[in-house]
Image (spheres, rainbow, N blue to C red):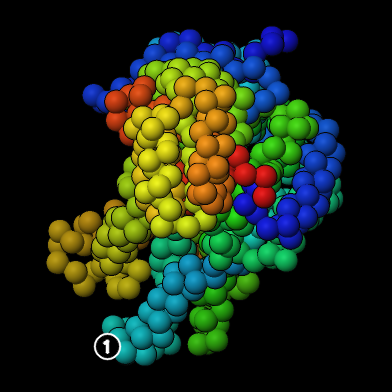
Amino acid sequence: MSTQPAAHVAATAADEAAVRRAISSTPRPPKAGPVSAALTFAWRGMLKVRHVPEQLLDVTITPVMFVLMFTYIFGGAVSGSTGEYRDYLVPGILVMSVLFTTVYSGVALNTDLTKGVVDRFRSLPIWRPAPLLGSMLGDTVRYVVAGIVIILVGVILGFRPDGGAGGAVAALALVVVSAFGLSWVFTTIGLLLRSPSAVLNAGFMGIFPLTFLSNVFVEPTTLPGPLEAFVNVNPISILADASRGLMAGNAQASDIAVVLAVAVVLTAVFAPLTTRLYRKS
Amino acid sequence: MTALAIEATGLVKSYGDTRAVDGVDLAVPRGSVYGVLGPNGAGKTTTIRMLATLIRPDAGSARVLGHDIVSEADAVRAAVSLTGQLASVDEDLTGRENLVLLGRLLGLRWAPAKARAAELLDAFGLTEAATKLVKHYSGGMRRRLDIAASIVVTPELMFLDEPTTGLDPRSRNQVWDIIRALVAEGTTILLCTQYLEEADQLAEGIAVIDRGKVIAEGTPGQLKASVGSNTLHVRLLDPDQRPQAEQVLAHDLGTVTLEADPSALSAACSNADSGAEVVARLAGSGVAIAAFSLGQPSLDEVFLALTGHPAEQAPGEHDPINEGNPA
Ligand SMILES: Nc1ncnc2c1ncn2[C@@H]1O[C@H](COP(=O)(O)OP(=O)(O)OP(=O)(O)O)[C@@H](O)[C@H]1O
Ligand SMILES: [Mg+2]
């Protein structure tokens, strides 16, 4: 230290007094409860949306472009009129948009792991699943935002579903619940793969074909037999149907039941898997 | 309450065929800095991760502040904090948000968490950067925030994993000052480092580990003494006088080492008296001396003597001549 110029010595002496004050002034508070810890992690997730809005833009701009392009380019050819096709497409794109957003839950988790911040979280005296559950809650806010954007774009293009605002909210809620279930799949992938971009690629490689092989864009009746069979059992199709039904005010209870069951099964299988992998990583 | 902050016996952790930690024993007293010194891949981080309850040991056991790291992991977590080797702060948040986040997770309410964040930002010279995203911080700022995040609630024991790797000398000194202040306030610190100088500067006790095993233990002085003789370092005002100085030293002390600095030379020297005599003779012979020191061997030499292979180079230039120079 003898090599430091005098000015530096003076500056650090002041710092040191402040550091000592800061160190000595904190009695340990009682531990954070599970709910408060999880909500704090949700808050962290929302701060990220604010600071890195690009992530949200990525997953909303593509669907918005799809709505515009498909409605005006293919609308006439597919449904005979752009208006009719728009009404078919918007509830489907809502599904696509929100499900795409779930990939980012896995990406965000993987980013945490590669950065070392998880080591700190895991060394804190908090309820073990709080970081995961909290991030998922924060992500849910993201899903809602992504969904609202699509619905608004639809409304701007003249989409006026018969189910009204209530139907739209119900559809959005159902889609967000599904997204919550699916996001556990991507958090599991996020803990298994090495880099955030690997998670992103794997996620989209899975969800892109699944979305296109659903009824989001076209009625499966026009498809060749085996493909039509697949599209009909694809849970994304069923979710899109339920979403259309809720918006139009004529939803099938069976569709909604299937959608909720899938979300429950995904959560039941992948949430414990994610928690276990997170603990071990 | 035991007198020891950390008491580890026979810790083992393997990854596949690699025995990352291969039977480490540690006895770390409370209230001081204890250095764990070792080159890349020695097993420092793995040891810390076991002690901080992030991974379970394959064999062996340890008590941290009296709590078993496996069966009483929660109690350990409630009393320690970890500053990992990778900066363990969230890059996509601001400095302030990071500290508020940790305050909340440690059980503070919103208002006290915010007040605490402001206090720490101020103490660590980060107030101006408080609302900037951490990814735009310099390495030194990030490290200071990282340490601030570790003391949002003052821990009894703090794990610091290579806190100055990659920092410039000024930032490194700032981090050292913070560490000294923490110890002065009663926190025990387990400091992992590859830098011999860092352990020498800060630690009261040092364990040298290599390939997962503790190969030596003691105070910095004891470790140096175990290597043997002292070293006389001399720096001249005029490099042209070095041959003359070399003659005087060689006559009295035997083998002389000419250092990379063209005005510096050194020689092994059995004790302080003979060193003082040589310096007096050197001055009497008309050689102008800029600085001299009679130091114990550097920890680099200790490491070489203990392991048979050299350790990594310390950050910045290590200039032993200045150690004895009251500038
Ligand atoms: N998660 C892991 N999986 C596989 N091997 C690992 C893992 N963690 C550590 N190792 C191996 O264990 C050995 C010790 O690693 P460790 O990180 O503890 O060393 P270190 O002393 O901290 O080194 P450095 O100074 O480079 O940080 C290394 O050979 C490393 O490759
Ligand atoms: Mg390490």
Q: Mark 1 points at which residue?
A: A77
Q: In which quarter of the image is residue B33?
A: top right
| Residue at 14% from the left image edge and 67% from the top image edge | A224
| Residue at 67% from the left image edge and 50% from the top image edge | B327
Which is more toward the observer, B154 or A56? B154
Is the residue marked by circle 1 packed among few (<14), some (14-19), or many (20+) residues within 10 Å?
A: few
Q: In which quarter of the image is residue A74?
A: bottom left
Name the spot of residue B204 as percent of width and height, x first: 62, 25
Name the spot of residue B200 as percent of width and height, x first: 55, 32
Asked whether residue A18 appears in the rendered view, the answer is yes
Asked whether residue B146 appears in the rendered view, the answer is no
Which is more toward the observer, B35 or A135? B35
Q: Is residue A277 shown left or right of residue B278?
A: left
Which is more toward the observer, B186 or A105? B186
State whether residue B30 is above or below residue A12: above
Q: Is residue B40 shown left or right of residue A167?
A: left
Name the spot of residue B32 as percent of width and height, x first: 67, 25
Name the spot of residue A36 as percent of width and height, x first: 72, 41
Q: Is residue B65 shown left or right of residue A73?
A: right
State whether residue A134 is above or below residue A168: above
The answer for which chain carries disc 1 is A
The quadrant of the rendering that contains the N terminus of chain B is top right
Q: Quadrant of residue A121?
A: top right
| Residue at 51% from the left image edge and 33% from the top image edge | B278
| Residue at 67% from the left image edge and 35% from the top image edge | A34
Which amino acid is tagged 1? Answer: Ala
